[in-house]
Amino acid sequence: MTCALLFRLLLLTALVVPSPGKGLGPTSRLRYSRFLDPSNVIFLRWDFDLEAEIITFELQVRTAGWVGLGVTNRNARTGSDLVVGGVLPDGNVYFSDQHLVDEDTLEEDGSQDAELQGLTEDAVYTTMRFSRPFRSCDPHDQDITSDTMRVLATYGLDDTLKLDRDRTFVKSIFLLQIVHPDDLDIPEDTIIHDLEITDFLIPEDDTTYACTFLPLPIVSKKHHIFKFEPKMVEHDETMVHHILVYACGNASVLPTGISDCYGADPAFSLCSQVIVGWAVGGTSYQFPDDVGVSLGTPLDPQWIRLEIHYSNFHNLPGVYDSSGIRLYYTAQLRKYDMGVLQLGFFTFPIHFIPPGAESFLSYGLCKTEKFEEMNGAPVPDIQVYGYLLHTHLAGRALQAVQYRNGTQLQTICKDDSYDFNLQETRDLPYRVEIKPGDELLVECHYQTLDRDSLTFGGPSTINEMCLIFLFYYPRNNISSCMGYPDIIHVAHELGEEVSDSMEGMMAMNNVEWTPENIKKAEKACKDAQQMVIIKTIDEVVENTTGWIPEIIPTTRGPCLESSGGKVEPQDKTPAGFRAAPVGLSSSSTATLRCLPLAALLFGQGAFSWLLATLKVVV
């Protein structure tokens, strides 16, 4: 009996990781940070190595209990990837890579792919720092990608590992940000200029597009705008959907005052070349050190159109707003003048999405063969360095794909986990070159299971859009290049007899939207000839036609196996930890691989009982 009890004691002792204190793991600065909950109890720092495909997290929570951090998906928490850890009252730490079997139940992964770098607890915080591969070979681990990631954070008030929905939070974050503002230069001669609508009474309508025309700063020599950020009244933040700044051609005759951008007076929709933009969830954005928006030369715009989209879904009366965009500019010139090219599906009036669709794809084609003719001068190769994605509430994913001479070259940008509430300008990991004659295709993925009527393209949040803005250099005069399908062909494929585009759109209301007809409509839209509309900063418009090419999916890179190997669904024995945390001996590591974390929590209460029992037996 004594031997049996000693063996049990050794097993329980092996579960507890000796805490080496402050010397545990790397202490390098992590560049990115964000609070993950409304009360600012959970604070996350992170950084990553793109070449090694390793990401490091540091989670700091105001608790003396266990903490957890992972990745979940849009629809359900079941299957979420969660790394948990904590510090016991005796100073020892526990740490494990787990997943959610259902909404409330955790289960330890067979393959432990998170590597502990530090776990401490003081009078206020429990702090856990660990690294993990972007893509492990464990099917229970969610991949870290350049998509929007839904980060799951949770904690307990003690070391009892039990999920509490009141202490569990999900926040959408773009984890793989390529450029951090701290890595960029801020010129000493920086000047600030605000473009804003002042004391505007927000109408009680669900959707309002307010536009006004404002002058850009007057400068005696060339300057560059190098940064912009939203400027909003705090209590109105939830009502401001997006803010766009459009450059106006210097020959444009512009109206005065504030009016509906797309209402009775078409003059308020003049100027279509976006130069900067902000949307829900975005923050400030600083251009790379070699590019900027040019000011002060004869070729530069002197006026802009400021567009603010308000969503007043609660129809609140008497709300005044003073929102806009703050520009930062300098006389210290960058190497390149930048521009913005708008791609996607021409929003109105052809775009439609059937109701009750699990998945529906829309396409917008751009053909660059006419760019040089419309630009009025040779167009150098376009170097794309950043992008902004935009759909409304039904949007689930977007991508822009490049073709040359009929062959797919690459995916320029994409997000397979798009979140309407996180729309921010993103940098590419490398610059993409677009040559005259290339074709650019935008694909938008929608889901309308919660809708029982057609969704049409339009300005309202409950309408839809399919847009990608490419940030590039050197600047040219092309402002947008967008496509839409031949709706007459689509109507005919759905069995509707129509003779013009307006009848074609009206006929969509006659279709019974069964799953079969939804797929038939999607295929008809893809197979139809596309009308491509190209527009310049001076409102010159040219049309051409084309066909939607096939998109070859991008292959995923190899997964990174843990030291225990990949866990297959049929495996019954856990494969073990990826690597031993600092401070573990080889013998304790081997024992730890054989025991689940649940035993640790049992052992916490049983440890002292075993010691007392041994004394009595001996």
Image (tube, helix red, strand yellow):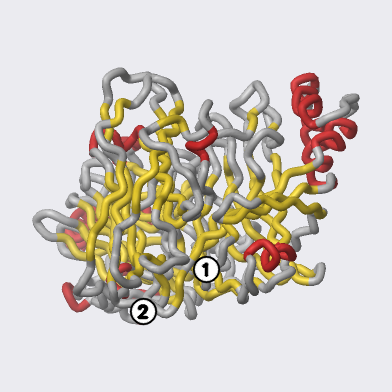
The Cα–Cα distance between marks 1 and 2, rounded to whole angstroms, is 63 Å
**Residue 224 in the image: x percent, y percent?**
35, 69
Badge 2 marks a residue whose secondary structure is helix
The residue lying toward the viewer, choosing from 483 and 150, is 483
Tag 2: amino acid: Ser
Quarter of the picture containing the N terminus is: bottom left
Residue annotated with mark 2:
587
Q: Quadrant of residue 126?
A: bottom left
Q: Amino acid at mark 1?
A: Arg
Q: Position of residue 607 (x, y in %)?
A: 23, 58
Q: Quadrant of residue 515?
A: top right
Which circle's residue, 1 or 2, is located before the other in the chain?
1
Q: Is residue 541 visible?
A: yes
Label 1 sits on a secondary structure element that is loop
Q: Going by the image, does 382 lie left or right of 403?
A: left
Q: Residue at x 53, y 39 (%)?
A: 392
The residue at the far left in this view is 123
Pick the quarter of the image with the C terminus. bottom left
Q: Is residue 194 left or right of residue 470?
A: left
Q: Residues within 10 Å of mark 2 (few under 14, many from 20)?
A: few
Q: Is residue 363 above or below residue 500?
A: below
Residue denoted by label 1: 475
